[in-house]
Image (spheres, grey):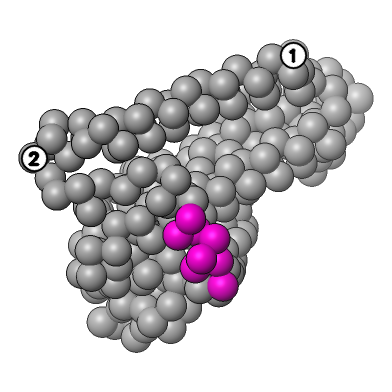
């Protein structure tokens, strides 16, 4: 990655944080939105709160990170299975693809408390919510990647008496890998949203639970600090998947 691709986003972020700090110090944000000053923390206050509450944020962040990681892995396993199955079977594709799309029409904010009522407040419902959010981009992207294989390449493999499994392993799967990683990057970026909704529905720990608790206490600086940790988790996951793609998809 070039220095420009790193430097320009950091420069823009620094400019935005500087403008935010200036607006908070001058009371512009509070006056603009007719808010009390204590509910509009500055970046300096958020950073101070982040450091002072680092032990709490680290403990709750670990809970949420574990939920995101496990839910994402569940989505990868189920998403790859459905994508490959729909690619290999037109009957299954016609039957399952509309249901895959329909799975995203149910609002997560409604589904999360229902799952909590059904299955309790353990980790199971949280993994289901996160997996449901991550499942769709992985499945659709991988399926589209499998469909994008050059027909000439498949015809060539058949002239060489390649079996169906060999065609899939040597042509279709490698072709679909970039699409899979694209879907995985989208999925890991939105996974924290599912984790927060799942913890709001019922949890005694985690960043979502901390945000909900701080909301009732008007601990706005710590709320922003928890959001910053959530963003860091998503960015770290995105970077790890991008690195994995560079290591696996070496021909791009």
Q: Nearer the viewer, residue 127 or 149?
A: 127
Tell me the distance, in whole angstroms, between the alpha carbons under discs 2 and 1.
Answer: 64 Å
Task: Judge from the rendering whether residue 67 lies leftward or rightward of residue 44; answer left or right.
Answer: right
Of residue 177 and residue 43, the one placed in the foreground of this image is: 43
Is residue 160 in view from this perspective?
Answer: yes
Asked whether 92 falls inside the magenta stretch, the response is no
Identify the residue at image location x=40%, y=74%: 125
Q: Quickly name the residue at label 1.
A: 152
The vertical placement of 10 against 67, above or below, is above
184 to the left or right of 246: left
Look at the image and give the residue range highlighted in magenta.
48-55
Secondary-structure class at tag 2: loop
Q: Earlier in the sequence, mark 2 or mark 1?
A: 2
**Viewer-side residue, 122 vs 50:** 50
- Residue located 36% across and 43% down the image: 42
Q: Which residue has dot 2 on it? A: 34
Where residue 119 sits: x, y (%)? 35, 83
- Label 2: few (<14), some (14–19) or many (≥20) C-alpha neighbours in 10 Å: few
């Amino acid at each position: 990655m070039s220095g420009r691709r790193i430097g320009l986003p950091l420069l823009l972020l620094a400019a935005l944080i500087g403008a935010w700090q200036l607006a908070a110090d001058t009371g512009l944000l509070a006056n603009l939105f007719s808010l009390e000053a204590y509910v509009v923390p500055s970046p300096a206050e958020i950073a101070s709160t982040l450091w002072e509450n680092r032990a709490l944020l680290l403990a709750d962040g670990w809970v949420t990170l574990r939920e995101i990681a496990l839910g994402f892995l569940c989505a990868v396993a189920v998403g790859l299975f459905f994508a490959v199955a729909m690619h290999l079977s037109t009957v299954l594709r016609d039957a399952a693809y509309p249901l895959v799309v329909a799975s995203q029409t149910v609002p997560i904010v409604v589904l999360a408390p229902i799952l909590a009522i059904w299955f309790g407040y353990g980790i199971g419902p949280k993994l289901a919510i996160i997996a449901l959010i991550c499942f769709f981009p992985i499945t659709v992207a991988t399926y589209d990647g499998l469909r994008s294989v050059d027909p000439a390449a498949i015809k060539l493999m058949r002239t060489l008496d390649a079996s169906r499994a060999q065609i899939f392993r040597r042509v279709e799967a490698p072709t679909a890998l970039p699409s899979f990683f694209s879907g995985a990057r989208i999925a890991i970026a939105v996974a924290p949203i599912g984790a927060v909704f799942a913890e709001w529905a019922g949890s005694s720990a985690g960043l979502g639970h901390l945000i909900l608790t701080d909301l009732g206490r008007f601990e706005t600086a710590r709320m922003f600090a928890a959001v910053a940790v959530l963003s860091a988790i998503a960015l770290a996951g995105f970077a790890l998947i991008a690195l994995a793609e560079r290591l696996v998809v070496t021909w791009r």
